[in-house]
Image (spheres, rainbow, N blue to C red):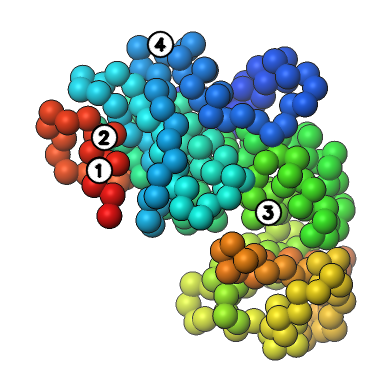
């Protein structure tokens, strides 16, 4: 973990700068320009020199040193079938590593996988980088005005927000789950089984969560996701009785993402009754070698 300024503080300081620079049309954040310009201004001897998209199988992004001796850093993001929204979050995540963690890194930099970035389920520096990316791209004060903490968003509300911030539906849903006062869950599934799930804090406290680490969790057959009902109605929310998902009724919003071949399901419950290592670098530029050695 970094010792200095915390992720929220970094994001808040940059948010002040961006608010001043773009008083109108503030979103989405042009994170690539921010990474290049801000690093060049603040650390001219060790800036971010490039932000480049590449096919990075198994990885979402990387921060790698450039030059020998080092002249700066390169941000790589996976652009293999990845949406612009996902790319923006990945670049912000790598910018966080640059701001907070570059002094801690070996000469090889860092490579970040999907669990750490898109699912926001990493630990240590990965968690810090995700916190920064979410706070920079989706500032809480602005997002609470789009979806209030007591709101029960349907797919349209979440998609509108995703468009506003230029991030994926998944990223915006995870951000909303962080501050909602409702008992709600996100379930991501494929072929009838949950891949992973996330609960809001109030849902978690009331014991409403879906475990995906042990036995596979089968999507209930009577749910919209289970019936593969991705109709207009399912996008707005369908009321389901108790014992479909939980021993209590739920409102289910389900949507099939063609791009990732995944089903995103949001469940609203009612009021509660209660480092990556590369080969030893020698004379080559790590950044160049990284690109060349891709499978
Ligand atoms: Zn990372």
Instruction: Name the residue carrying label 2.
Output: 288
Task: From the image, tell me which residue sits under label 1.
Answer: 292
Looking at the image, which is closer to me, 250 or 229?
A: 229
Q: Toward which corner of the image does residue 286 lie, by quadrant?
A: top left
Question: Which mark, residue 44?
Answer: 4
Label 2 close to label 1 by CB (< 8 Å) = yes
Q: Residue at x 48, y 31 (%)?
A: 95
SS category of the residue bearing label 4: loop
Question: Residues at badges 2 and 3 in contact (C-beta under 8 Å)?
Answer: no
- Mark 3 and mark 4 lie on one chain; the one further toward the N terminus is 4
Relative image position of residue 293 (x, y in whole percent): 24, 47
Q: Is mark 2 within 8 Å of ligand 1?
A: no
The residue indicated by pointer 3 is 169
Q: CA distance from mark 3 to mark 1?
A: 32 Å
- Name the element at disc 3: helix
Asked whether mark 1 lies closer than 8 Å to ligand 1, one says: no
Q: Is the residue at mark 3 in contact range of ligand 1, meaning its CB lies under 8 Å from it?
A: no
């Amino acid at each position: 973990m970094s010792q200095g300024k915390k992720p929220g503080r970094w994001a808040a300081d940059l948010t002040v700068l961006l608010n001043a620079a773009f008083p109108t049309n503030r979103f989405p954040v042009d994170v690539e320009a921010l990474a290049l310009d801000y690093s060049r201004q603040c650390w001219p001897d060790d800036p971010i020199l490039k932000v480049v998209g590449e096919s990075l199988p198994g990885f979402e992004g990387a921060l790698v040193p450039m030059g020998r001796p080092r002249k700066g850093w390169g941000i790589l993001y996976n652009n293999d079938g990845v949406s612009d929204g996902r790319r923006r979050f990945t670049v912000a995540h790598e910018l966080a590593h640059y701001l907070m963690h570059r002094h801690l890194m070996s000469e090889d930099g860092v490579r970040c996988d999907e669990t750490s970035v898109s699912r926001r389920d990493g630990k240590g520096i990965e968690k810090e980088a995700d916190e920064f990316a979410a706070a920079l791209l989706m500032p809480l004060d602005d997002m609470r005005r789009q979806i209030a903490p007591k709101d029960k968003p349907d797919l349209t509300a979440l998609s509108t927000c995703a468009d506003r911030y230029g991030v994926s539906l998944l990223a915006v849903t995870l951000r909303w789950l962080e501050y909602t006062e409702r008992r709600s869950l996100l379930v991501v599934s494929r072929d009838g089984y949950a891949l992973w799930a996330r609960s809001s804090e109030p849902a978690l406290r009331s014991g409403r969560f879906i475990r995906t680490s042990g036995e596979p969790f089968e999507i209930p057959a009577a749910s919209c996701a289970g019936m593969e009902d991705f109709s207009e109605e399912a996008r707005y929310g369908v009321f389901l009785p108790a014992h479909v998902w939980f021993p209590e009724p739920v409102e289910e919003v389900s949507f099939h993402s063609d791009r990732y071949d995944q089903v995103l399901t949001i469940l609203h419950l009612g009021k509660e009754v209660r480092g990556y290592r590369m080969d030893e670098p020698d004379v080559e530029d790590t950044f160049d070698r990284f690109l060349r050695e891709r499978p």
